[in-house]
Image (cartoon, rainbow, N blue to C red):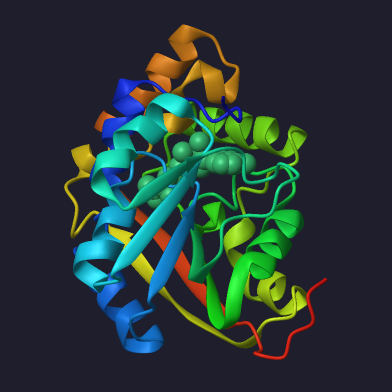
Amino acid sequence: MGNGYHYDAVERDRLMAQADLFGGADLRRLQAALGVPATALEVGCGPGGFAARVRHTWGVPRVEGLEAHAATADRAAPLIDAVHRRDALDDDPLPGAALMYARLVARHVPDVTRLVARMVDACAPDGHVLLIDADDATLLLHPAAEAFERARRATHARARAGGADPFVGRRLPALLRAAGLVDVDGFALTLTSFERPRAAFAAMLRPYTLTENNGLPADACAAAQAALETDVRDFSWTMFHVWGRKPAAAASR
Ligand SMILES: C[S@@+](CC[C@H](N)C(=O)[O-])C[C@H]1O[C@@H](n2cnc3c(N)ncnc32)[C@H](O)[C@@H]1O
């Protein structure tokens, strides 16, 4: 099973490291805003690092994941309460929970409107749907590194050709309102190379430099990664955390 997301062992480790991008500040703010839901389902849970933090740092007593990539679902399984090995856009309803959330998934799917509608359908009445995602217009690098910018443009072109939107972050509130949610609210957190050494930032941006994602030849990919590691001095990247409540009386669609 797979969905086109490029995986290798390095990518799984990268995602595990990225699960704690904000040192717990994201989870503390989510807990303050949303309380502690009884159950949560992470759509596109990857290797499970963030879901494990929802379980243990946020304190949600039951956290399940849903993941289409089989070997990655296997890595998540021991970390959380259950993993559903399937595609979130297939024809069966999603498993339900009081909190339905997706982190860095909206930017990858070919039909984000459908994904959100399915999450809202599966959400318990009065529960919340939460989207956590970035907007690549907020990925700021200085000095500009042309080899990396070429790889970034090629990655975006490929993603868009597949229907995905690397600039989805700005649309998260609109997507939730259009899906019928109320009390839409959120916050943004910015990660910079003041908090994270630039080598770690460069490692975080590895997916842009892979042929599988950008279609560029190996030498251009190597140049893109080297440019990140040696030319760029300062980095900044913003993640949006946006949620809405499903009205208790919402008619099922
Ligand atoms: C960037 S990773 C994020 C993983 C995790 N949410 C995190 O924050 O670490 C995106 C994940 O979404 C999964 N994914 C993408 N589209 C999916 C779909 N249609 N159904 C299920 N999983 C999907 C990918 O396989 C991948 O594991």
Residue 185 in the image, given as x and y percentages of width and height: 53, 85
Image quadrant containing the N terminus: top right
On screen, residue 77 versus residue 196, left or right, reads right
On screen, residue 187 versus residue 118, left or right, reads left
Residue 175 in the image, given as x and y percentages of width and height: 70, 69
In the picture, residue 113 is in which quadrant? Answer: bottom right
Closest to the observer: 228 or 205? 205
At x 75%, y 55%, the residue is 114
- Relative to 247, residue 74 above or below: above
At x 44%, y 31%, the residue is 207
Q: Kindly tell me whether residue 229 is visible in this rendering.
A: yes
Residue 225 in the image, given as x and y percentages of width and height: 36, 25
Q: Seen from this angle, which residue lies furthest top?
A: 218
- Relative to 18, residue 159 above or below: above
Closest to the observer: 170 or 133? 133
On screen, residue 110 versus residue 97, left or right, reads right
At x 52%, y 74%, the residue is 242
In the picture, residue 170 is in which quadrant? Answer: bottom right
At x 53%, y 78%, the residue is 128
In the picture, residue 135 is in which quadrant? Answer: bottom right
On screen, residue 71 versus residue 182, left or right, reads left
User: What is the count of numbered marks?
Assistant: 0
Image quadrant containing the C terminus: bottom right
Residue 92 in the image, given as x and y percentages of width and height: 71, 47
Q: Kindly tell me whether residue 24 is visible in this rendering.
A: no
